[in-house]
Amino acid sequence: MSFWAASTDLVFAPGVPILLGVLAIAQMGVHLVFFLNISSAADQTNNFLALAFGTFAVALIVFGSMIIMANLNHNMMMPME
């Protein structure tokens, strides 16, 4: 579906990134349920907590790196005129 969405003219051009994002989230959900066997059962609590912590750690590293890079970019010396 993603290749079709990116290469077709049937989808409004500014909506293609949104559609690709929705399809990516759906694919992550399918992988969690069918391949990683994450469900809402009571015995899956540890797996869910491990997944939540991993997601938190990745988000912290990515967004922290973005904040650091933006701060470094802001504090760079201006070129001499």
Image (spheres, helix red, strand yellow):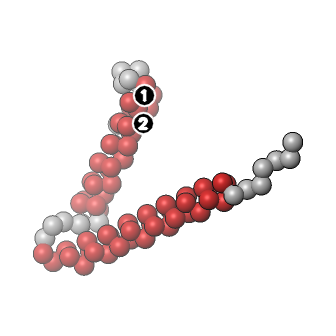
Q: Amino acid at mark 2?
A: Pro
Q: Secondary structure at mark 1?
A: helix
Instruction: Specify few, some or many for label 1: CA neighbours under 10 Å numbering under 14, 14-19, or 20 or more.
Output: few
Q: Which residue is mark 2?
A: 17
Which of these two is toward me, 9 or 69? Answer: 69
Which of these two is toward me, 65 or 27? Answer: 65
Image height of 61 relative to 26, above or below: below
Image height of 1 relative to 27, above or below: above
Q: Which residue is located at x 25 percent, y 71 percent?
A: 48
Would you identify the image quadrant in which residue 68 lies? bottom right
Direction front: furthest residue: 81
Image quarter where the C terminus lies is top right
Q: Amino acid at mark 1?
A: Pro
| Side (left or right) of 34 relative to 18 | left
| Side (left or right) of 71 relative to 22 | right
Would you identify the image quadrant in which residue 57 lies? bottom left
Q: Which residue is mark 1?
A: 14
Residue 64 in picture, x, y percent from top left = 52, 64
Q: CA distance from mark 1 to mark 2?
A: 7 Å
Residue 33 in picture, x, y percent from top left = 24, 60
Residue 55 visible: yes
